[in-house]
Amino acid sequence: MTSLTPASLAAIARLRAYNSRPFPVWDRLPMSRRAAVLILLFAGRRGELRVVITMRASTLRSFSGQAALPGGKADTLEETPFEMARREAWEEIGLPNDDSKIPKPFRIEHLCQLPFSLAKTELAVRPCVAFLHSDDASSNNPASVEDNMIPQLDAKEVAAVFSAPLHNFLRKEDEVPEGVNVPGKKSDWYDGQWTDWHSCRWRMHNFHVPINNQKVSKPKVREDGQEAFAEVPEKLEDEPERYLVWGMTARILVDAARVAFGEDPEFEFNAHIGDEETITKLHKQGMLKEKTGAADVSIRKAVQATQESSSKI
């Protein structure tokens, strides 16, 4: 296994020590407004921290074909954010929900939870940060996450699984190790713009992640139509060389990188982490009740106006 760099070790320590402030509004939200995502980190081949990202299946009703973090909505009011995130990661990418079933020498450490973000589907989303260790002291068989942990993808929900270096979500350009090439120019990595959302200025980040130097796992369909899983997916002629990560997912990754590395981004950004002020305001206005009725229509109109103004920038 490649050892974590000193910068990566320091980042894990910062995340482990991070405590988000209490957010009592969460306890007053109905189950249909609660969600969580898993920021799953692991050591890359050069000791850098990498994060697992999925491409959602094109058949899904929400955010189809978009990059996302494993996660989803609550099943019960008693379910904690980490329980939600781990359950969804099991369903989407096959990461065992039961720690005892994670193959040796891998193990998961829950590091912290970041402040809540607001999805455009009107959900309060808790980002849960975890690190996938591969240095179990009880095993003499060191392993690489990239080489030895093959995702078990649910083709109904996930079109692909890839990864990105966490620190790069603080940079305007690709951070390219010596001897590594990326498609296009290094400046192709980032672009962004400001937009208005719920009477606030909200920074939209767009990251274009190179996938030419990593394994991208995809579900494979056999001739009989049954789904199987491919360790090395077939390369398609129209396969993109970069995957776009944007919207709430990009904002969450910027927040996670800021906490982990104790640095501000090179690009413009929202100073606050998460969207708890906006969530609180909407809750006070009665707009985060059960996901039915006029409240949803009102918020969707606000989201639509945001998207239209963003497209004109």
Image (cartoon, rainbow, N blue to C red):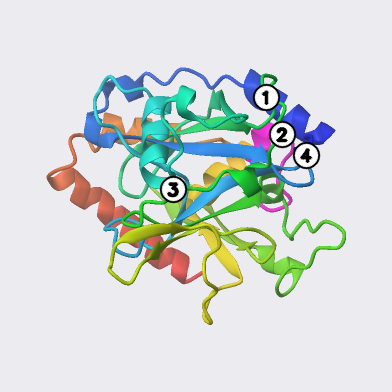
Q: Distance between the residues labelled 4 and 3?
A: 24 Å
Task: Please indicate whether residue 222 sits to the left or right of residue 236 in the image.
Answer: left
Q: Earlier in the sequence, mark 4 or mark 3?
A: 4
Q: What residue type is labelled 1?
A: Ser
- Does residue 260 belong to the magenta stretch? yes
Front residue of 264/81: it is 81
Q: In the figure, is residue 186 to the left or right of 246?
A: right
Circle 3 SS class: loop
Residue corresponding to mark 2: 142
Name above or below for residue 174 compared with residue 14: below
Q: Quadrant of residue 144?
A: top right
Residue that badge 4 annotates? 2
The residue where tag 3 is placed is 152
Residue extending farthest bottom: 237
How far apart are the two marked residues, 1 and 4, measured between alpha carbons? 15 Å
The amino acid type, in three-letter code, at marker 4 is Thr
Residue 271 visible here: no
Residue interval drawn in magenta: 257-270
First in sequence: mark 1 vs mark 3: 1
